Structures are given as structure tokens and as C-alpha cells.
Image (spheres, helix red, strand yellow):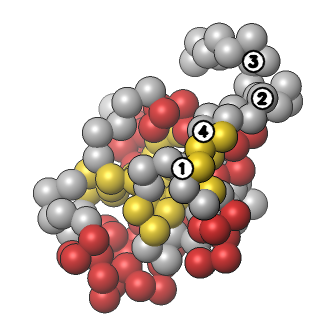
Amino acid sequence: MNSAVAYFSGRLAFETDVADVAQGFDGVVVDARNDESWRQGHVPGAVHLPTAEIAERAAEVVGRDAEVVVYCWGPGCNGATKAALEFARLGYAVKEMIGGFEYWAREGYPVERDGAVERRSPDPLTAPVSGVECGC
């Protein structure tokens, strides 16, 4: 296998994007941000487990056999990478959701806040405004 194939295969083994998660991820989605950030809005159905608490609380919050996807704020933040590393150290199958919560919201996926779910219009700089997938 050439080095480019190995590199990109490796990335796909440990990364996913917001569209893939929204289209039917069957595992546990973990929001690794702090309490204030969680309250601002999060992926519906996500589990709130801040990175600093993963080592101590993961086993009580996430089943050992679960596939885990972690996210933080967005591409300018490496919080999801740190959270994924903590889960990997504990032996979980884990992926990082690239784009994070920022791109989840900007691409028009549902956002939960205070028990209510809202859906914003997609940002035309990040997703097709027609609602049609980008085809990638």
C-alpha cells in the first residue's frame, strides 16, 4: 500500500464528519465541552462528558462495547482530539467528529437546548442550502 492510501485510510478509521453522524450513526455521540458550552446547544441525543471527566466517568456513561464519536466546538479546537485520545486510552473504539458542533449547527442539523430541538438554515458557505447532500 502506498503512503497516501495508508494515510487517508488511517484518517477515515479515526475520523467522521457531521453528515456521516447525522445520517445514522448507531453508537454513542459524546459532547466533550464544558457545562456552559453544553447549555448553549448540543447534538440531540448526545451524552455530555467533558474531556477532564472521561478517564473517571466513561465506564458509567458509555458501554464498553459502544462505538464512540466525540466532538468539541469546531475545527479551530483540538478538544475532540484530546477527548478521543482519552477514550482510546481506555480501550474504546472511538472517532473524532471533524467540524465539531460548529459545523453540525452551520450545516443545519438539529440542535438541542433546554430540552427543545431547533433546526437552523444551513450556512451557504458550509452546506448546500437546498438541503441536498454535497455528494462526497
* Residue designated by label 3: 128
Residue at mark 1 to residue at mark 3: CA–CA distance:
20 Å
Residue at mark 2 to residue at mark 4: CA–CA distance:
10 Å
* Residue designated by label 1: 43
Residue 43 as seen in the image, left or right of residue 30: right
| Secondary structure type for disc 1 | loop
Residue at mark 1 to residue at mark 2: CA–CA distance:
16 Å
Residue at mark 1 to residue at mark 4: CA–CA distance:
7 Å
For marks 2 and 4 on the same chain, the one whose residue lies earlier in the sequence: 4
Q: Where does the image place residue 49, in percent across and percent down from the top left?
A: 43, 73
Residue 97 as seen in the image, left or right of residue 127: left
The answer to whether mark 1 and mark 4 are in CB contact below 8 A is yes
For marks 1 and 4 on the same chain, the one whose residue lies earlier in the sequence: 1
Q: Where does the image place residue 106, in percent across and percent down from the top left?
A: 75, 39
Residue type indicated by callout 2: Ser
Number of the label disc, if any, that sits on residue 97: none
Residue type indicated by callout 3: Pro
For marks 4 and 3 on the same chain, the one whose residue lies earlier in the sequence: 4
Number of the label disc, if any, that sits on residue 110: 4
* Residue designated by label 2: 121
Question: How packed is label 2: few (under 14 Cα within 10 Å), some, or many (20 or more)?
Answer: some
Q: Taking 27 as reference, is 136 above or below it?
A: above
Of residue 119 and residue 71, the one placed in the foreground of this image is 119
